[in-house]
Image: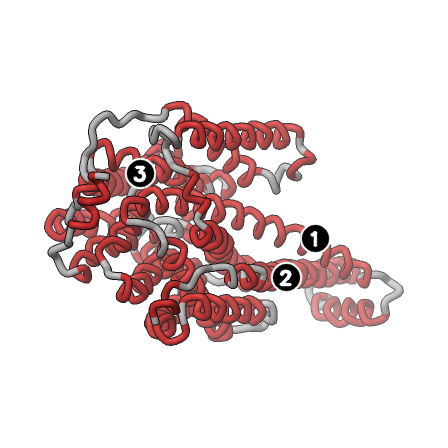
Amino acid sequence: MENTIQQEEWKFKINPWITMIPVMLSIFMFALDETISNVALPYMAGSFSISHNESTWIITSYLVASGIIIPTVDFFSRLIGRKQYFILSIIIFTVASVMCGLANSMPMMLVARIIQGIGGGGIMPIAQAVIFEIFPKEKLPQAMAVFGLGVIMAPILGPSLGGWITENWSWPFIYFINVPFGILCLYLTQQYIEEPPYSRKQSNVKMDFSGFFFLAIWLLTLQIVLDKGNDADWFGAPWICKLFTVSMLSFLAFVYIQKKKAKTGDGLINLSILRNKNFLIGTGGQIVLMAVLMSSAAILPSMLQRLLGYTSFLSGISMLPRGLGCFVASILSGVLVVRIGIKSTAMMGLVVLAIGGLLFGEINTNIALANIALPNFVFGAGMVLSMVPLSNISCATLSNEEQTNASGVQNLFKNVGAAIGTSIATTMISRFSQAHQMMMIKSLTDTNQVFNERVSAISSAFMTQFDPATATHMAQAQIYRLLSQQAGLWGYVETFRYYAVAVVLIIPFIYFLNDTSRKKN
């Protein structure tokens, strides 16, 4: 009761747009490091003498560590005070960035990335909670548009920035660039972020060790299953089945413990917040959108490098039009929410995002870098127009006191969604490519006149340097490489089309949301 009175009486003295500066700077650093390593993995793999598959742990270790720490944000905020914990998270993140840049072995890099994830995991939930508190309801759509721009644009710019830094300097600098921004963020946070009474240090705060244990086991085992499942033929491998069972049992144990401790308030998170219809539907939609965002940011540069021979820098540059689309949509989002309401804006964004997925579904191997620009622009615009309103409306009916816990719950499931989405996309590309290769290879037979004519035409060019048998074999090998390339392209194309299907399926659920902005207007 006392907290409620304090919450109602408390008034923020600093201009909220000034407070947004350190908040957005911290968000951008955290979100950028989710993808900035993507294009630099081959260079890091060479430095550490490891395979490409092993190098992916540099990315997943960061996501898992941040995913584990996110549900504990509310606990640590009550233990030492939310502002103090936010500052501590920035310090840990910045110091760990230096450790990443100085790493000279894979174990050292993994330790540094885990520590960086621990620091970064506390940034996003607190930043989101602060934004919901400092802005009045009528200005919240514009604030969330800026917030969404940082959350979505940073992972998009990550590959292009990482590719440029890697090719012009060296990969350690993709981590060293966090240091000056981290120091600036610390100073601005201390100066311009206020701490209301209900977010200060509380007494008699207990740590939920059992919940934390099962949370860690759940996410660690799930990430291993997602990372190695496709290579191990998923549930065709007994060890994958066993590990998945452990993961699901740990998840159920975690949920049981949180529900049991919700009455005393000693749990890591309060899952009863999922009873809020807006929060449940909005979070579910954001899980799907985060899966699409993170997986598409991973597979598009991979497609350009594998199929079209782009460098890491050029494949990263291909993501810039998506960033431009995000920027334009962030401006439109605030205007559209006021004019047509949050629900209509979200549905419009989902339609635009689906169109972007379909445009990607029309690409071929003869495209230039410029041909990727339009689908990327539309994709980025649709992502902001859909995710920002969903993020806004999902927490619009919650009190300020519930925001920190709600943000922790939401970001936990969004992290899991990103991991699952990336794994599903990788599996779909592999399986679709195999299916199309099996269909197309039936045409490469001696009874196919077109195939024979093509072999003859190509082999005749080789006969000037090789004997007829070798020339024929080389011609057949070249045709097979083209077939593999086309099969790989189909794998990516169909995956992008399924993105369109996934986001369209969210639209019917939008009707069940309470559009508070329309009631007010």
Which numbered disc covers residue 222? none
* Residue at 53 percent of width and 50 percent of height: 421
For residue 136, say whether it is visible: yes
Which numbered disc covers residue 73? 3
| Nearest the eye: 270 or 451 | 270
Locate residue 479 relative to residue 273 in the image: left or right. right
**Real-space Cα distance between discs 2 and 3?**
39 Å
Position in image of residue 513 (x %, y %): 47, 59
Which numbered disc covers residue 434? 1
Secondary structure beneath disc 1? Answer: helix
Is 289 located above or below residue 119 in the figure?
below
Is 516 located above or below residue 371 in the figure?
above
Dot 2 or dot 3, earlier in sequence: 3
**Real-space Cα distance between discs 1 and 3?**
43 Å
Query: Which numbered disc, 2 or 3, marks the residue closer to the eye?
Result: 3
Which numbered disc covers residue 494? 2
Secondary structure beneath disc 2? Answer: helix
Task: Tell me where residue 246 sits by quadrant.
Answer: top right
Position in image of residue 258 (x %, y %): 43, 31
Tell me the kind of residue under disc 2.
Glu
For residue 158, say whether it is visible: no
Q: Residues within 10 Å of mark 2 (few under 14, many from 20)?
A: many
Query: Which numbered disc, 2 or 1, marks the residue closer to the eye?
Result: 2
* Residue at 38 percent of width and 62 percent of height: 388
Position in image of residue 62 (x %, y %): 38, 41
